[in-house]
Each structure stands twice: as C-alpha cells, then as structure tokens.
Image (spheres, helix red, strand yellow):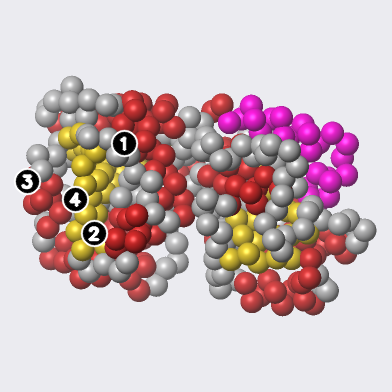
Amino acid sequence: MKKRIALEITGALGGGGYKRYTESILKALVEEGPENEYLLFGVFWRDFPRKLEHLDLPKSPNVLRDFRRFPQGLLFPLEEFCGLRYHERFLLEHGVDIVHGVNSRTPPLDRLPSTTTLHFSELWDFKGYDKFYFNTMTERTVRQCDRVIAISEHCKRSAFKAWGTPADKIDVIYYGSPTTRFTPPEGEPVPPPGVERPYFLFVGFTRPHKNPKLLAEAFCKLKAKRPDLPHRLVFAGGHGPDKPWIEERLAKAGLLEQVVFTGIVPQENIHKLFQAAYAFVCPSLDEGFALPVVEAMGCGIPVIGVNAGALPEVIGDAGLVPEPTPEAFCEAMERLILEPGLHASLRAKGFENLKRFDWNASARKTLAVYDRILAERGRK
C-alpha cells in the first residue's frame, strides 16, 4: 500500500559515512518501493545549498524535498526541552505516514510513528553542543521510536547496554556492499601523488575512538622487527586530536618519512587509495559497522581489524582480527606480508563475504519495518 515516508537526512549533509549510507539506502528504497512517496527533510544553517548539492539523491518524481534554513543550535534545543514541535507540524501538513531518522536521530514527535537507523554503538565522550546532538538527541530518539534499526548485532547489544532498549524493539539491517567505484582496478593500480606502494591504509579521523595510536605503535614495532620491509603507512582522513602524538611517536622511531597524512580525500577519489593499497587496517575500538571494511573488500584488498565492536561480525573469516594491542596488530601485519598465500586467500574470502551485504535487501527489510510499525499503530 502506498505510503508517504519522511526521511530526516540532516546528518548526511556533513559528509562521511552518514552521507554514503543515506545516498545508498535512499536509492534502494526508491527501487524497492516505487509506489511510495519519499519526503526528504532537514534543517541546516551554514553553506546549506552547497552541502545539499554534494548529496547524490534520487531524482524520481516520487522523491520530494523540504529542506529549511534554520539555526540548529537554536531549533533543536527548543524542540528537545521546550515542547516546540516545529518539525512535526510541517510533517503533518505534508500528510506524512511515518518518519525515519536516517542518521540516528529524529525530531521530537508526539503524534507521528517513527523509526531511526542507529549507526554508532557507544555514547562518545563529547562536550558541549556535540554531546547534546550526538548523545542526548540520540537517546531520546531511541526511546521515542516505535522500532529501531541497528546496523549490526553489536550495535543492537550496545543499545540495550546504553539505554535498556528491549531486544525485540530492534531490527538488525546491515549496510550494503560498496558502489561500483569500489571494485578491483583495471590494470595496475595507481596511487594518488605523494603516496608510494606498498602501503597499509587507514581511513578515518585521527580521533581516540578510531584508535590510530595503536596502529602507529604497531607500525613502529613492525619496522623495528623487520626494517627491511618496504611497506609504508597512509592515514587518509581529517586530522584529529591524536595526530600530534602519532607524529611525535613516528619521528622518535625515525619513521615519519614512511608515513603519509593525506587529509580528507574527496569521495570520488578515495577508491583509488583503496585499490592501490596492500591492505586496509582498522584498529577502531568502537565501530557500529565500519563501511570502509566492506569497501576495501570490494576493491580486492585484505583487511586487518581488531577484536572489538562490530569488526569481528562484519569481517568474519575474511580478514585478520587480532586483539586490540600493538603487539597483536604488529604480528597480524607481519603475518600478512610473510605467510605464503595468505594475502591472496583473504582477497578471495573478502569477495565472498561481500555477498552478505546488499543495499536492495537492506531496503526491503527497511520497508518491512515501516509496514510493521504502521500495522501496530493501526494506520495502514
């Protein structure tokens, strides 16, 4: 039955994983549920038109838009603490049947049924407005929603741990496999200027929850043990608070020239870094899913994660998953280089593992969540 589904996508305007998830799931929803109408909404203040242009959103006639320019720092607290229902009022005017907070949050709602996709698995130690936006609003959203979509079993368990969310309220729906860009290269891969092969690739901000210090320490141990190895290390992503420590540690070991910090790489070029890498390394202690792991497998490069968060669940036996210590991670890097046949074996297992992740299957399951909520509410 035809539905008008409102999708809150403000988080996607900031780029990163939220952007990639939003673009992919929307495209699949339109393909799998063409009879529905999809109202994309959100509020933003700075650089709103430019950021909206960078989103690859479906242009189908059944995809509607209502984006409004309004200071988030004023509107969101008024809705959260003062009873203002700015969003719900205009959603009701649009005749919306259900609201989906695509990026872990929905506005406060009194009358409309809702769900959200919960992307992260722990309450991060944010300060100030970020703490309100990422922690306070997310907790209220999870409690408010009729059902919650978690992107992994680990994320589901963490929601129960953090907020006591009942397991039977949460549906686990994985991310899909990567886009067409994240495929093995045709011919010899060519890394971007300034990057020399072979190299281990890290993608993400150098922030504590991504655990880049462990990677730097493991790399130092690897080079101290096997200085003959030509492998380098590439950090691709924004510069976070851990970067000075990493640079100091690498300089002390005399390895700074063997490490590259690329800064943020445009999404249209990041696949080239994957394709030319020797392996992808993900030492993060707190991943709800880790989409770059799947992107790396799509490009045909092995993955080294750690036994933490959702990484063991997503990687399975298609990569190496050592304990999150510099010694264990160093051993995994060395093993991948020296053990005959391991690199090729993990590459093949990675392609097989990708079959578990499909955006259209994720969209069908998401549409089923909408139907269940509306049936339980007696609205459809």
User: Can residue 175 be found in the magenta stretch?
Assistant: no
Query: Disc 4 marks which residue?
Result: 66
> Which numbered mark, 4 or 1, is in the foreground of this view?
4
The mark nearer the N terminus, 4 or 3, is 4
Q: Which residue range is magenta in the image?
A: 331-354
Which residue carries the number 3 mark?
A: 93
**Disc 4 residue type?**
Asp
Q: Determine the CA span between mark 2 and mark 1.
A: 28 Å
- Closer to the N terminus: mark 2 or mark 1? 2
Q: Look at mark 1 in the image and give the residue it sits on.
A: 169
Q: Nearer the viewer, mark 2 or mark 1?
A: 2
Q: Mark 1 belongs to which amino acid? A: Lys
Q: Position of residue 314 (x, y in %)?
A: 57, 38
Q: Earlier in the sequence, mark 4 or mark 1?
A: 4
Q: Secondary structure at mark 1?
A: helix
Type of secondary structure dominating the magenta stretch? helix
Question: Is residue 311 in sight in this rendering?
Answer: no
Give the labeled residue for mark 2.
43
Name the residue: 48% across, 30% down: 358
Mark 4 / mark 2, whichever is N-terminal: 2
Camera-side residue of 145 and 17: 17
Q: Pick whichever, 92 or 119, lies toward us.
A: 92
Cα–Cα gap, marks 3 and 2? 17 Å
